[in-house]
Image (cartoon, helix red, strand yellow):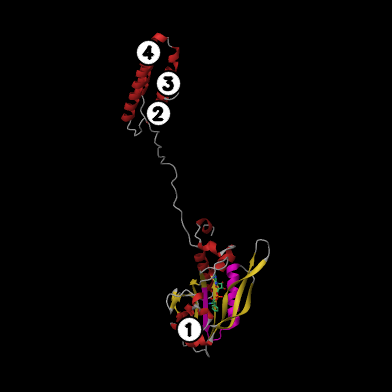
Amino acid sequence: MQALQKQATNELAGVSDSEALEAWRIKYLGTKGRVKTAIQRLGEVPKKDKPAVGKATNELKTALRSAFDARLGALGDSRTKDRPAAPEVDITLPGNKPTIGHLHVITQTINDICEIFARMGFTVAYGPEVEDEYHNFDALNIPSHHPARDPLDNFYIDEKVMLRSQTSTVQIRVMENTTPPVRIIAPGRVYRPDTVDATHSFMFHQIEGLYVDQGVTMADLRITLDQFCKAYFGHNVATRFRPSFFPFTEPSAEVDILFHRGDGTEYWVELGGCGMVHPNVLETVEYDSEKYTGFAFGLGIERMAMRKHNITDIRYLFESDVRFLHQF
Ligand code: FA5
């Protein structure tokens, strides 16, 4: 016992860091350590010597334990004998990088669309999302009895103020402040209490286009939208014009774009409405409708982003699941 104690104490004196101290603890005080072995071997001691040897073993254990605690304190280690070693900080490990965000796919789409129209000479205009009935309806030749004004089909704030249901409002706001020619596009959010499904949302984005000058024709409209679709979707994209009706354009059309399902089948999705600006609208903003003609269009931005990126459900765009959004 004395020899063991001497050896242990000598070794402990040479310990200079917590790693060596831990190795020392395992060697002498660990569950398979020298002290434990000594205790286990008590059985081999003759009966008459047992009390003395037992006592010496206990004293050895206590002595080494307190020598260990003293050394632990001296090394400035915050561990106590009952607590496991605190994890050491490895300052060479790479840190956790903060996630870097990027523009939402809808914002990217708006930027891309604006850039294409900019090349065709269109400048970007903006209008308010909280709008009055005059700009959302009256000035657009939508009479007070028109079903599109139904309170159930719009988000009214009070009798005369609403969240705009279309970006066509910006046509009026721009023409009120500009003498022709006018050539603008107007991207932005619009709101409608539509039932939400794979292609409809209660809040979505449109891009309005307006070109008023002398001699503007429907052929200009057709070629402008065709060129735009080719520039944005690629040269092989199929689009079509369908006759339609809007109070603020005459004649009016709807422009559709071909979508492809995974199983190889195809279907048309309506991208937006368009037409020649109605003379009543031109007169409302005090443009001479005998002298000037113009075209206008309003396209759904989500539908374009979905077609471009093969997104099958509009709701993905607004659920803000970053795993989805990171793909674009
Ligand atoms: C209009 O809003 C007209 N202001 C378009 C227009 C402008 C016509 C200028 C003539 C001249 P419409 O209600 O069809 O038209 O909406 C235009 C497009 O917005 C639709 O073709 C579709 O692409 C998109 N859209 C309409 N409702 C929703 C919805 N609930 N969710 C997502 N996109 C929608």
Callout 3 amino acid: Lys
- Kindly identify which residue carries mark 3: 36
**Amino acid type of the residue that numbered disc 1 sits on in the rendered structure:** Ala
Q: Distance between the residues labelled 2 and 3?
A: 16 Å
* Residue sitting nearer the eye, 4 or 152: 152
In the rendering, at what x and y percent does residue 255 appear?
60, 75
Front disc: 1 or 4 = 4
Question: Of helix, strand and loop, which one carries label 4?
Answer: helix
Residue 199: x, y in percent?
Answer: 57, 67
At horizontal 34% and vertical 18% (from top left) the residue drawn is 59
Q: In this view, does 174 lie above or below 74?
A: below
**Pick the front one: 163 or 276:** 163
- Mark 1 surroundings within 10 Å by alpha-carbon count, few (fewer than 14), some (14 through 19), many (20 or more): many
Q: What element carries label 2?
A: helix
Numbered tag placed on residue 22 in the rendering: 2
Q: Is mark 3 on a helix, strand or loop?
A: helix
Horizontal relation, residue 13 to residue 154: left or right: left
* Cβ at disc 1 under 8 Å from ligand 1: no
Residue placed furthest toward the bottom = 290
Q: Residue at x 31, y 27 (%)?
A: 70
- CA neighbours of label 4 inside 10 A, class few (<14), some (14 to 19), many (20+): few
Q: Is residue 166 in view?
A: no
Q: Name the residue under label 4.
A: 51
Q: Quadrant of ligand 1?
A: bottom right
How many tags in the picture?
Answer: 4
Image quarter for residue 298? bottom right
Residue on which the image places disc 1 = 139
Kindly identify the amino acid type of the residue bearing the numbered disc 2.
Glu
**What's the amino acid at mark 4?**
Pro
**Disc 3 vs disc 4: Cβ atoms closer than 8 Å?**
no
Segment colored magenta: 207-233
**Mark 1 or 3 closer to N-term?**
3
